[in-house]
Image (tube, grey):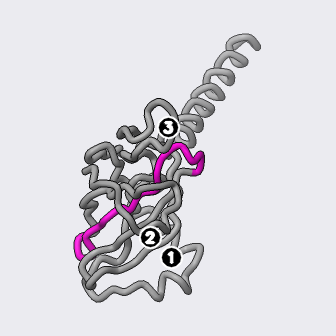
């Protein structure tokens, strides 16, 4: 075989390996199916449940060992990390419903052992803060509650938008 054919063969193998690596690390890692309910994503944004728990068990075995395995939900997907419906805070669209892509969760409360309530604020301060209501038993997203201002400590709710 000539040097050119050998070099071409090596180049093809390198390109295949490079393409496979790019697919795995760029596309494959983000191939999680996006689920949206009333404008709020309800899918995990970095790992699926199985991969997350495997990584947690490997990297933080002491934390993993403390998970409640009593049959109740052992972990929850925080809704709205990619996008959520929210009320525009100011400007010409103030008071209108829009889609925020910059909500930052800040707190969580358990209500009557039935619900999780997660508070979040808009990092850009473009949208009013929100509360996400999640069923504690099933982990399913129920609704987004928009607050009256960008400060999520304000207890007055503007309206339930979902």
- What segment carries the magenta color? 123-138
Q: Which residue does the image show at 47% across and 42% down from the upper left? A: 28
Q: Which of pointers 3 and 1 lies earlier in the amino acid sequence?
A: 3
Residue wearing tag 1? 57
What secondary structure do most residues of the magenta stretch adopt? loop
Mark 1 touches mark 2? (CB < 8 Å) = yes
Picture quadrant of residue 49: bottom left
Question: Residue 99 at what x, y percent from top left?
Answer: 40, 40
Say few, some or many: other residues with alpha carbon within 10 Å of mark 2 (under 14 / 14 to 19 / 20 or more).
some
**Magenta stretch holds residue 75:** no
Residue 43 in the image: above or below residue 24: below
Q: Which residue does the image show at 50% across and 52% down from the upper left? A: 103
- In the image: residue 3, left or right of residue 53: right
Residue 140 in the image: above or below residue 86: below
Question: Residue 123 at what x, y percent from top left?
Answer: 58, 51
Residue wearing tag 2? 53
Residue 15 in the image: above or below residue 20: above
Front in this rendered view, residue 78 or 63: 78
What distance separates the C-alpha of mark 3 from that of mark 1?
Answer: 25 Å
């Amino acid at each position: 075989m000539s040097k050119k054919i050998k070099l071409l063969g090596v180049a093809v193998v390198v390109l295949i390996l490079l393409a496979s690596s790019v697919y795995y690390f760029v596309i494959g890692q983000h191939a999680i199916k996006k689920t949206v309910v009333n404008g709020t994503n309800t899918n995990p944004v970095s790992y699926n449940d199985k991969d997350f728990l495997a990584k947690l068990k490997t990297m933080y075995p002491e934390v993993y060992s403390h998970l409640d395995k009593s049959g109740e939900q052992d972990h929850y997907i925080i809704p709205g990390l990619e996008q959520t419906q929210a009320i525009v805070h100011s400007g010409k669209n103030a008071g209108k419903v829009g889609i925020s892509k910059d909500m930052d969760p800040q707190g969580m409360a358990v209500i009557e052992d039935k619900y999780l309530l997660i508070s979040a604020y808009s990092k850009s301060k473009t949208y009013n803060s929100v509360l996400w209501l999640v069923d504690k038993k099933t982990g399913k997203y129920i609704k987004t509650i928009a607050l009256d201002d960008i400060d999520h400590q304000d207890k007055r709710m503007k309206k339930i938008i979902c």
